[in-house]
């Protein structure tokens, strides 16, 4: 495609709060085409599992997915995917809700059990870039749930950040791609409690230093590691930003953290 494809990943508290989600989707719908939305929903899945008496087990911030938990995430992520699609249609955004199994969009294999057995969790091996591009060329907006498949009939729970990054890398072979991770903070902060401490840009060397100093920690580490891999694979631009900043994407008013290899 000649136009730059923009991919947005959303998760966290926005997913759980209807008014915040509706506001985000209104801003997303107003963005120019072509665009793709990837959503998470892990907190909602944990809440539903608790209601149904199914224990949630996390290892290094990643969900262990047994058969019972897979049923939970299928229900939660699938329902959320269609809810988001319907809300976008209400904003005259011609969206289509997809999992990785739909039109073989994203294929994965079950993560090896060594050193940690995460159960039915997928590591992505292929993205159907031509199929996704064909939707974009028709003016359709893909909305991707964090579920993939192994080609043998097995659905796999898959990290939404990885899905967004893998789609970005796949499409970068055919077009210019920009990737935006949207969450509750303005971007990467020197002090998470100080909104004035936003780091406007981070190189790979900066990231390694900030990680060693403990400034970047916990869930931000895999997010940034994945983001730098997408840049290395040819993605034009990767940013981490507040979910309320969509209307400023591409303008001088944009506020967030832009990642650079060097």
Image (spheres, helix red, strand yellow):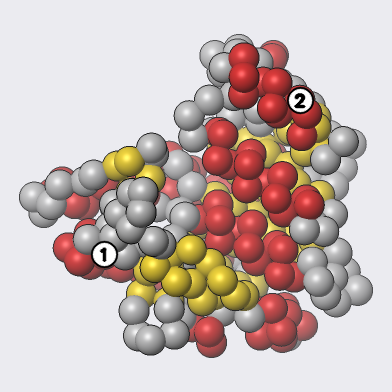
Q: Is residue 15 above or below residue 145?
A: above
* Disc nearest the viewer among 2 and 1: 2
Residue 206: quadrant of the picture: top right
Residues 208 and 90: in front is: 208
Contact between labelled residues 1 and 2, with CB atoms less than 8 Å apart: no
Residue tagged by mark 2? 206
Residue 109: x percent and y percent? 44, 71
Q: Is residue 182 found left or right of 108 in the rendered image?
A: right
Residues 123 and 160: in front is: 123
The residue tagged with tag 1: helix, strand or loop? helix
The residue at 43%/76% (across/down) is: 149
Name the outermost residue toward the front. Answer: 114
The residue at 38%/37% (across/down) is: 60
Residue 30 visible? no
Residue 143: x percent and y percent? 55, 68
The crowd level at tag 1 (other Cα within 10 Å; few <14, some 14-19, many 20+) is many
The residue tagged with tag 2: helix, strand or loop? helix
Q: Is residue 254 found left or right of 140 in the rendered image?
A: right
Q: Is residue 195 above or below residue 258?
A: above
Residue 74: quadrant of the picture: bottom left
The crowd level at tag 2 (other Cα within 10 Å; few <14, some 14-19, many 20+) is some
The residue at 34%/79% (across/down) is: 154
Q: Is residue 56 found left or right of 139 in the rendered image?
A: left
Q: Quadrant of the C terminus?
A: top right
Residue 152 visible? yes
Residue 73: quadrant of the picture: bottom left
Disc 2 versus disc 1: distance between alpha carbons? Answer: 37 Å
Q: Is residue 168 found left or right of 160 in the rendered image?
A: right
Q: Is residue 150 above or below residue 54?
A: below
Q: Quadrant of the N terminus?
A: bottom right
The residue at 21%/46% (across/down) is: 56
Residue tagged by mark 1? 70
């Amino acid at each position: 495609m000649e136009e730059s494809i923009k991919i947005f990943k959303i998760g966290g508290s926005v997913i759980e709060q209807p008014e915040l989600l509706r506001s985000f989707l209104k801003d997303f719908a107003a963005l120019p085409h072509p665009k793709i939305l990837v959503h998470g929903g892990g907190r909602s899945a944990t809440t539903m599992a608790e209601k149904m008496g199914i224990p949630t087990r996390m290892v290094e911030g990643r969900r262990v997915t047994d058969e019972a938990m897979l049923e939970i995430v299928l229900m939660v992520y699938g329902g959320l995917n269609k809810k988001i699609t319907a809300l976008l249609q209400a904003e005259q955004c011609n969206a289509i809700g997809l999992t990785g199994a739909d039109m073989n969009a994203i294929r994965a294999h079950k993560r090896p059990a060594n050193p940690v057995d995460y159960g039915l969790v997928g590591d992505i091996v292929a993205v159907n870039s031509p199929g996704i591009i064909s939707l974009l060329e028709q003016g359709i907006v893909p909305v991707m749930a964090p579920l993939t498949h192994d080609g043998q009939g097995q659905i796999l729970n898959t990290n939404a950040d990885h899905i967004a990054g893998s789609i970005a890398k796949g499409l970068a072979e055919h077009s210019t791609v920009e990737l935006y991770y949207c969450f509750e903070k303005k971007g990467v902060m020197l002090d998470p409690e100080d909104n004035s401490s936003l780091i406007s840009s981070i190189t790979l060397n900066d990231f390694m230093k900030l990680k060693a100093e403990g400034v970047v920690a916990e869930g931000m580490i895999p997010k940034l590691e994945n983001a730098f891999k997408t840049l290395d694979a040819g993605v034009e631009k990767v940013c981490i930003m507040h979910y309320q900043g969509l209307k400023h994407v591409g303008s001088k008013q944009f506020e967030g953290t832009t990642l650079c290899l060097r």
